[in-house]
Amino acid sequence: MAVALLVAAGRGERLGADGPKAFVMLAGRPMLEWSLDALRAVAAIERIIVAIPEGFDAPAGTVGVAGGTERSHSVRAALAAAGDGPADQPILVHDAARPLLTPAIVTATLDALARTGADAVVAAAPVVDTIKRVHADAPGLHVEATLQRHALWAVQTPQVFRRDALERALALPDDVLAAATDDAGIVEQTGGRVHLVESPRENLKVTTPVDLRLAALILEERC
Ligand SMILES: Nc1ccn([C@@H]2O[C@H](COP(=O)(O)OP(=O)(O)OP(=O)(O)O)[C@@H](O)[C@H]2O)c(=O)n1
Ligand SMILES: C[C@](O)(CO)[C@H](O)COP(=O)(O)O
């Protein structure tokens, strides 16, 4: 049986709301409740651990744990709260900031982990924009290269891991974890094999106010 880690302890600075992003109201409910619905609907998930900000309560039926300074630190705290388990146990990590999660996406990532024997499987969508790389440290946004779009995928959560691969990755030094923007990236750094599974672009991340408006519209359409 799988364990799900829902990371909800971020500040949401880019959203600019009054409180932590995961508890901002979205279509009438705190944002994290939407992805919890999808996780609760999947029978293969036996337990849900939620990394929460200080002063907030764990949602009903979940185990709450205080989040860390950066996202990966919150994932590490949530995994520690999950206790021990077999090396090949599937551990699913999801951002509370992706409220449009569906049970079908969760099941597709879990099934792909079992089918491929990979260390990690990541939900992702093909990139639809043309992406240019600039000199990161030089002024003037001077273009260095235009990347080949057909090889580019935008990764989302859920990201599902063999427990031993995620544990190995989360044992990397604190500063390496702090620099990571997703968990599969640290599994790659420890030599793990990572696969993608196609997921709808609709499984968007609420980062800025326009994302919140879009998510509200889509949820109203679904209800
Ligand atoms: N220390 C942190 C930072 C982030 N997260 C979670 O990781 C997910 C993705 O992070 P992001 O969208 O960057 O959220 P914030 O860190 O809250 O946003 P910002 O960077 O704008 O402050 C979110 O569900 C967020 O709650 C977390 O649990 N603990
Ligand atoms: C994990 C993630 O949602 C994959 O798209 C994303 O990288 C989180 O990044 P953020 O910088 O913490 O928003």
Image (tube, grey):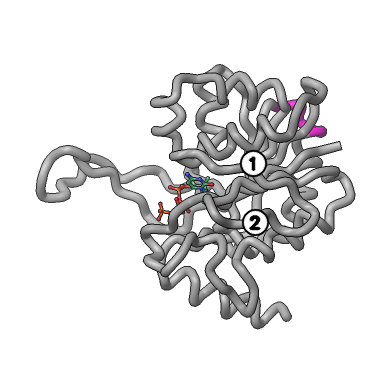
Q: Residue at x 89, y 50 (%)?
A: 43
Q: Is residue 123 left or right of residue 83?
A: left
Q: Which mark is residue 57?
A: 2
Q: Which residues are magenta?
A: 114-118
Quarter-wise, where is residue 118 in the image? top right
Q: Residue at x 50, y 22 (%)?
A: 189
Q: Is residue 82 left or right of residue 212?
A: right
Q: Residue at x 71, y 78 (%)?
A: 222
Q: Residue furthest left?
A: 139
Quarter of the picture holding the N terminus? top right
Q: In front: 62, or 211?
A: 62
Residue 56 within the magenta-colored segment of the rendering: no
Asked if disc 1 is less than 8 Å from ligand 2, the answer is yes
Q: Is residue 210 above or below residue 75?
A: below
Separation of marks 2 and 1 at Cα, in angstroms: 25 Å
Would you say residue 117 is visible in this rendering? yes
Q: Residue at x 28, y 43 (%)?
A: 133
Query: What secondary structure predominates along the stretch shown in magenta?
Result: helix
Residue 78: image location, x then y, percent: 64, 38
- Provide the secondary structure element on which disc 2 rests: loop
Quarter-wise, where is residue 169 in the image? top right
- Label 1 belongs to which residue? 159
- Precedes in sequence: disc 2 or disc 1: 2
